[in-house]
């Protein structure tokens, strides 16, 4: 049986794979993130922390962007 954290991790991963950063920026009335050549920054890869090589027991995802940036979203249970 999956834990709450594992279910949320799977949901975050699925949702993040559908994100179009250019559309999100436009909906917020902002200019899209761009690379040095002017092309829009995209999410290249979404993986779990474990699959991304992080040495942690925490659950979460790693977002790897086309400009080389990486971000993590971690799930922490408080109650």
Image (cartoon, rainbow, N blue to C red):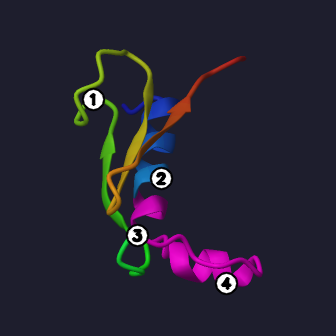
Classify residue 24 as left or right of residue 55: right
Q: Return the x and y of residue 40 as percentages of the image width and height.
A: 43, 78
Dots 4, 2 in contact, CB < 8 A = no
Q: Earlier in the sequence, mark 2 or mark 3?
A: 2
What residue is pinned by disc 3? 35
Q: Return the x and y of residue 35 as percentages of the image width and height.
A: 40, 70
Q: Is the residue marked by circle 2 packed among few (<14), some (14-19), or many (20+) residues within 10 Å?
A: few
**Which span is picked out in magenta?**
14-34
Q: Which of marks 1 and 2 is nearer the N terminus?
A: 2
Q: Which of marks 3 and 4 is nearer the N terminus?
A: 4
What residue is pinned by disc 1? 50
What residue is pinned by disc 2? 11
Residue appearing at x 47%, y 73% in the figure: 34
What residue is pinned by disc 4? 26
Q: Earlier in the sequence, mark 3 or mark 1?
A: 3
Q: Residue furthest right?
A: 29
Q: Does the magenta stretch include residue 69?
A: no
Q: How far apart in space, not on screen, are marks 4 and 2 (Cα)?
A: 24 Å
Figure quadrant of the C terminus: top right
């Amino acid at each position: 049986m999956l834990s709450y954290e594992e279910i949320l991790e799977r949901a975050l991963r699925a949702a993040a794979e559908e994100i179009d950063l250019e559309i999100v920026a436009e909906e917020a009335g902002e200019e899209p993130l761009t690379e040095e050549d002017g092309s829009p920054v995209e999410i290249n890869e979404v993986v779990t922390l474990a699959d991304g090589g992080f040495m942690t027991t925490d659950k979460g995802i790693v977002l790897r962007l086309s400009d080389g940036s990486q971000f993590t979203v971690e799930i922490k249970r408080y109650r």
